[in-house]
Image: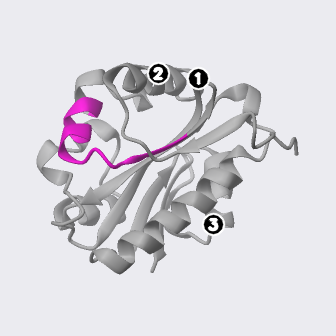
Amino acid sequence: MMKVSNKEIILSRAQLSLLEIKQVLELDSLVYEPEYCSEFDQVVGRFNKNKDCFITLRNQDDIIAYICFFPITKRLANMISSGNFTNDAEILPTDVLSYEDSEGVLYIISVVVKPEYHNSDVVKRMMIDFENKVQELSELYNIKSVLATAISEKGHSTLLKSKFQDIVVNQRKSIYIMEKIY
């Protein structure tokens, strides 16, 4: 595994600008099939409901990796955990909550790493910071679990290493619905 220098890569929890959201969508298009890429308006709609939803890794001004997560309604949590969820377009703006209004469940909508960094330690670094962020949120708000959807074997492996458990597996489409209890 390639180690990336801390001087080279900066971890950030800062809120993104609209231009940076476009960078995130460009990253998505590098790693996801088109059916799994969100539209700009969808991302901005969710972002406007909870702006504290990204952890990014940057090489200067270039976003090279990110994780996006936010509190969701019980309606959406039930839909996801029962396997009746197919893609991000099903997330209504009303399903995204503020941390103050949390119903206890966070959803990781996306973990993306620029292809040239796939064999580095950036995902590990980002997931460690995510864990720290969830611990902080758990102390301040009512966060009890995190749901995630993995659409690749690599994504599934990353979540397993972070102690997520499979709750629904669709082998035919390689979709894994996973959960971690806090």
Give residue 105's position: percent from left, percent from top: 31, 68
Asked if residue 17 is positioned above or below residue 141 in the image, the reply reads above
Identify which residue, 160 or 46, lies in the foreground.
Answer: 46
Mark identifier at residue 28 = none
Q: Residue at x 69, y 65 (%)?
A: 161
Residue beneath label 3, please? 162
Q: Among all residues in the image, which is located at the extreme front?
A: 7
Residue beneath label 1, please? 62
Q: Among all residues in the image, which is located at the extreme left?
A: 94
Question: Comparing marks 1 and 2, which lies closer to the viewer?
Answer: 1
Tags 1 and 2 in contact by the CB under 8 Å rule?
Answer: yes
Q: Secondary structure at mark 3?
A: loop
Left or right: 88 as drawn, with respect to 178:
left
Is residue 58 one of those drawn in magenta? Answer: no
Amino acid at circle 1: Asp
Asked if residue 101 is positioned above or below residue 143 in the image, the reply reads above
Q: Quadrant of the N terminus?
A: top right
Q: Residue at x 24, y 48 (%)?
A: 50
